[in-house]
Image (cartoon, grey):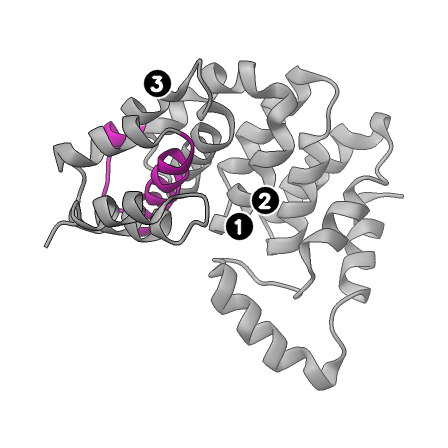
Amino acid sequence: MTYDEYKKAMLSAAPEDRVRDDFLERHKRIINCEYGTIGLKTPFVKKLAKTVPTDARAETVEACLADAAVDPLYETVLFASFVAARKGDYGFTLDSIKRLAAVYGSWAHDDCTVPCLKWAADGLLGDLAYMYDSEKVYEKRFYIICLMCFCLNDERVDFALDRLKNVGFGEYYVDMAVAWAISEAAVKYYEKTVALLRERRLPKFVQNKAIQKARESFRLSAEQKTELSKLRII
């Protein structure tokens, strides 16, 4: 199948007209995408991406990027991201993700793609480090989600926490990603994360949101949650 045929398959799988308008409106609010959306569920897009033959991955991503410059859709960009993220040629994946992330239009592009790249984590943490200082919100968020997904382990947690507390704040979807990552760190490395929160150097919104999300976890004790609540910035 060509890229155009994959796009047609996605368009034909859109919700029926009688539910389309209401569904799309809700879908748009959730993903808050800068582009148009068909209203497809992520598992459908991911499953379709798996059908792209290995030797057709490059041309599929290339065609999607060309299409995105003219008629960007949330689902087509996500589809190409899933194609690019499949385990295989690291060089191809790196180049494709760099180009795709530069045109991302939703936080969901980052959050859905990064977990698929665990196989390439060691290389991406270095090769995508430029995203940490990017002025593009979804590039910066992409790297923060990489820190959360790939670095909350014994070898990298200190690096992750240092990066998280020193990122350039001020963009909502960046700040939310940092809060999410810190809340996950609190669950896995409580003492290290509490030490960071005690510094109170994070913006008020980020600190309080991280604490809120951490306290929602069933993996923390009542005593830990009480301690966290005392670290909120009033």
Percent across and percent down for residue 187 are 40, 37
Residue 116 visible at all: yes
Instruction: Tell me the kind of residue under disc 3.
Output: Phe
Q: Please name which of the two marks, 2 or 3, marks the residue nearer to the observer.
A: 3
Q: Residue at x 83, y 31 (%)?
A: 56
- According to the picture, the residue beneath numbered tag 2 turns out to be 112
Q: Residues within 10 Å of mark 2 (few under 14, many from 20)?
A: some
Q: Residue at x 79, y 47 (%)?
A: 47
Query: Is 14 covered by the magenta stretch?
Result: no
The local secondary structure at tag 3 comes to: helix
Percent across and percent down for residue 141 are 41, 39
Q: What stretch is highlighted in magenta?
A: 164-188
- According to the picture, the residue beneath numbered tag 1 turns out to be 108
The local secondary structure at tag 2 comes to: helix
Percent across and percent down for residue 193 are 29, 31
Location of residue 95 with respect to 173 vertically, above or below: above
Quadrant the C terminus occupies: bottom left
Kindly indicate whether the residue at mark 1 contacts the one at mark 3 (C-beta within 8 angstroms).
Answer: no
Q: Disc 1 versus disc 2: distance between alpha carbons? A: 6 Å
The local secondary structure at tag 1 comes to: helix
Q: Disc 2 versus disc 3: distance between alpha carbons? A: 23 Å
Viewer-nearest residue: 202 or 68: 202
User: Does residue 82 appear to the left or right of 176 in the view shown?
Assistant: right
Instruction: Tell me the kind of residue under disc 2.
Output: Cys
Considering only order in the chain, which callout, 1 or 3, is on the residue closer to the N terminus?
A: 1
Q: Please name which of the two marks, 3 or 1, marks the residue nearer to the observer.
A: 3
Kindly indicate whether the residue at mark 2 contacts the one at mark 1 (C-beta within 8 angstroms).
Answer: yes
- According to the picture, the residue beneath numbered tag 3 turns out to be 159
User: Does residue 7 appear to the left or right of 166 in the view shown?
Assistant: right
The count of marks equals 3
User: Does residue 92 appear to the left or right of 115 in the view shown?
Assistant: right
